[in-house]
Amino acid sequence: MDNKIFQELVHAYHEKKLAHAFLIETNDKEKCYQTILHFLKVLNCPNDYQENCKNCNLCHLIETHSLPSLLTIYPDGQNIKKEQIVELKRAFQTKPVFSKYNMYILMDAEYLNSASANTMLKFLEEPEEYIIGFFITNNKENVLDTIKSRCQILLDYYDYDATTDIPLEYFQMAISYALEIETVHNEALLYNRETLLPLLKDKKDAFWLFNSLLRIYENLYQVSLNIEELDTEFERFKFLLKKDSSYFFQKIQLILDILDKLNYNLNISLVLDRFVLEVGE
Ligand SMILES: [Zn+2]
């Protein structure tokens, strides 16, 4: 998992510098929640945790939300109520039996009111070794200071799936790249190494680039089927329109496959070379 806060948490754990409470600001609470569950498996798995541990009961219980020492709290109506926190404290009075930690994840931390936040304070001020908590919010500025000041603050932002707002620079990059591939294909491997690779600092950059390429070829495909007009920004690909629609369709399939592979394969250089080799077939 390449998620940044996941890496940070695992690192802190291995360094034995794990805080006991985190406030995480995120733009995708569901993904953030999954990231935390993933980390909690690492934290508790009695085996040397590997990606998707299927062997142990503990990971399974975390996955299926049935571990008694892991509690998720959601707002009850307009607030997270004091009673919910009292209940949490009661549940966590004793050390966990099966897992290393008692763990809570509090969704929508901005819904803590002063009564419930105050009830929370003892938890945060005199933390037990075996308790760890996560407060999740979409805006940390809306979380009460009493909570904020006692948590380690992390940011957890996701933009991998946002194909709608591709930054302009990636479009420019993709247009140049596609022109290179379509005109001087035999030099494209060199182009990968010398021009493109230095621009792609991480997987996200490659992700945007291939999403931009996808847009270009999708537009060309639609034009070849007389469904759409050629986008003005793709004028320079007009010369390709004498090709059959299957020409574009195959490229779309390849790009989709590469986007899928990007989720696993960290080596951008290999991904680029594969694209060039297969796109020419
Ligand atoms: Zn496990």
Image: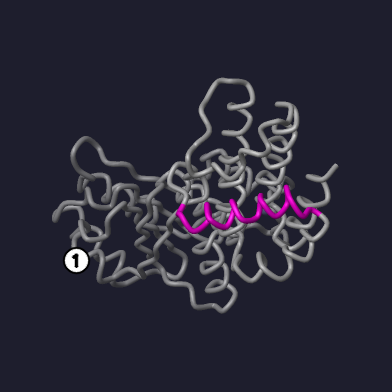
| Amino acid type of the residue tagged 1 in the rendering | Asp
Q: Is 244 part of what is drawn in magenta?
A: no
Residue 241 visible, this angle: yes
Which residue occupies the extreme top position in the image?
226
Assign a secondary structure to mark 1. Answer: helix
Q: Is residue 190 above or below residue 113?
A: below
Give the x, y percent position of residue 129. Answer: 45, 70
Residue at the extreme left of the image, as rendered? 114
Front in this rendered view, residue 62 or 256: 256
In-image side of 172 versus 22 (left or right): right
Residue sitting at 35 percent across and 45 percent down? 73
Which image quarter is the N terminus in? bottom right
Q: In this view of the protein, which residue sits in the foreground, 218 or 120?
A: 218
- The secondary structure that most of the magenta stretch takes on is helix
In which quadrant of the rendered image does the C terminus lie?
top right
Label 1 Cα crowd, 10 Å radius (few <14 / some 14-19 / many 20+): few
Is 153 displayed left or right of 192 in the figure? left
Residue 104, image x, y percentages: 41, 53
What colour scheme does the image use?
one colour
Q: Find the magenta span and give its range.
A: 167-185
User: What's the residue at 52%, 50% (across, down)?
Assistant: 160
Assess whether residue 174 is covered by the magenta stretch: yes
**Going 74% across and 55% down the picture, which residue do you hit?**
271
Read off the residue under disc 1.
Answer: 145
